[in-house]
Image (tube, grey):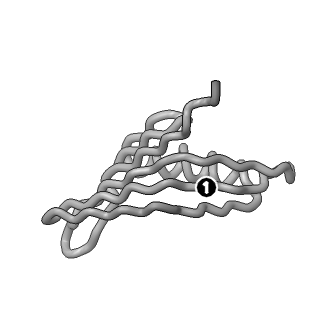
Amino acid sequence: TSVVTPLGRFTGWESVRDGLYVNFLQKAFAERSLRPENVAVTVSGNTAWAVFDWTFTAKLADGQPFSSKGWESHVYQKIDGRWVIAHLHYSVPPPRQ
């Protein structure tokens, strides 16, 4: 599993789980809400990918509100009859000029 985010690159499930999900998402936020829109899913044999826009709203651990928007893509592989995530890529819009 690999993940590319504005915070960095993570390779291997332990790195993704510990570096991104536990140390960032679970510890930094007291509340989290992710709203996907414009979802497009394509399946080709044992590979599939999903692309969508997202809006993330949250409350930081100190109680301050947080929000962001961006784009995301997931790549899946069908292994032993079940779909597993092989790669995620998160992007945020460039800053306005």
When the figure is inspected, residue 78 is found, relative to residue 97, above or below; the finding is below
The count of marks equals: 1
**Disc 1 target residue:** 55
Q: Residue at x 60, y 61 (%)?
A: 34
Q: Residue at x 38, y 55 (%)?
A: 51
- Quadrant containing the C terminus in the rendered view: top right
Q: Residues within 10 Å of mark 1 (few under 14, many from 20)?
A: some
Q: Residue furthest front?
A: 97
Q: Residue furthest top?
A: 97
Q: Residue furthest left?
A: 45
Asked which quadrant contains residue 50, the reply is: bottom left
Q: Residue at x 44, y 36 (%)?
A: 9
| Residue 61 image position (x, y, % from top left) | 80, 51
| Residue 13 image position (x, y, % from top left) | 40, 51
When the figure is inspected, residue 15 is found, relative to residue 79, above or below; the finding is above
Q: Indicate left or right for 3 with 7 as reference.
A: left
Q: Nearer the viewer, residue 13 or 51?
A: 51
| Residue 42 image position (x, y, % from top left) | 26, 62
When the figure is inspected, residue 79 is found, relative to residue 30, above or below; the finding is below
Q: Amino acid at mark 1?
A: Thr
Question: In the structure shown, which secondary structural element does the residue marked by tag 1 occupy?
Answer: strand
Q: Indicate left or right for 24 with 19 as reference.
A: right
Q: Nearer the viewer, residue 78 or 34?
A: 34
Q: Residue furthest bottom?
A: 81
| Residue 2 image position (x, y, % from top left) | 37, 45
Q: Residue at x 68, y 60 (%)?
A: 32
Q: Indicate left or right for 4 with 34 as reference.
A: left
